[in-house]
Amino acid sequence: MASAKNRDFARLLDDLFQAAAIPETEDHSESATTPTIPFDYLSVVDELHSGRIRVSGEEASAEYRAASTAIEEALREMELRRAEIVPPPLEPAPLPSIDPLDIARELEIDRISSAGDLARVRRAFAFENHPDRVAPHLRDRAILRMQVANMLIDEALRRKKS
């Protein structure tokens, strides 16, 4: 092959074709095989320069406009379908109860037998209902729920001691 400084692309292709034409000998291993070219690049270049393949600016812009129109139609259709979909009305979530009986049922105080279990229930309830852990609009209600739960647990602890 010619030196890298003096080669142009055509000479490089010629060298590659010549290397591909040289038959394999037993000396060469499979890893040292010569490169193969799947098709003749020069014939592709000749075909492009021959004028048989023509792409005018008008044809390209017409294709672009057609594609743009198709995309716009698809987007309009998507918007129409989106307008047909009516989301169900959102119902506000019920507020957590502040009724002592409901909170006692939630805590399951009647089933608890030891002071350690009551402390565990208090921590679990606080983890879920503490005013710092709820949405701002529910903080006042969370404060009341925590007060009622603490009162119920304290009463249960007094009953366990006596």
Image (tube, rainbow, N blue to C red):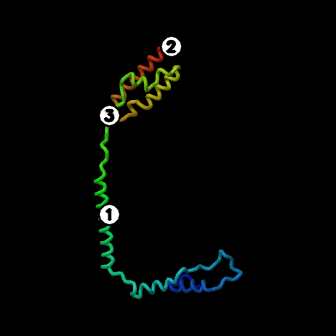
Q: Residues within 10 Å of mark 2 (few under 14, many from 20)?
A: few
Q: In the rendering, at what x and y percent does residue 157 appear?
A: 48, 17
The residue beneath circle 3 is: 137
Q: Is residue 1 left or right of residue 106?
A: right
Q: Is residue 123 left or right of residue 87?
A: right
Going from N to C along the chain, the mark reached first, 2 or 3, is 3
The residue beneath circle 2 is: 161
Mark 2 lies on a secondary structure that is: helix
Going from N to C along the chain, the mark reached first, 2 or 1, is 1
Viewer-side residue, 54 vs 87? 87
Viewer-side residue, 74 vs 131? 74
Residue type, mark 1 in image = Ala
Q: Residues within 10 Å of mark 3 (few under 14, many from 20)?
A: few
The answer to whether 124 is drawn above or below residue 34 in the figure is above
Residue type, mark 3 in image = His
Q: In the rendering, at what x and y percent does residue 45 appear?
A: 45, 84
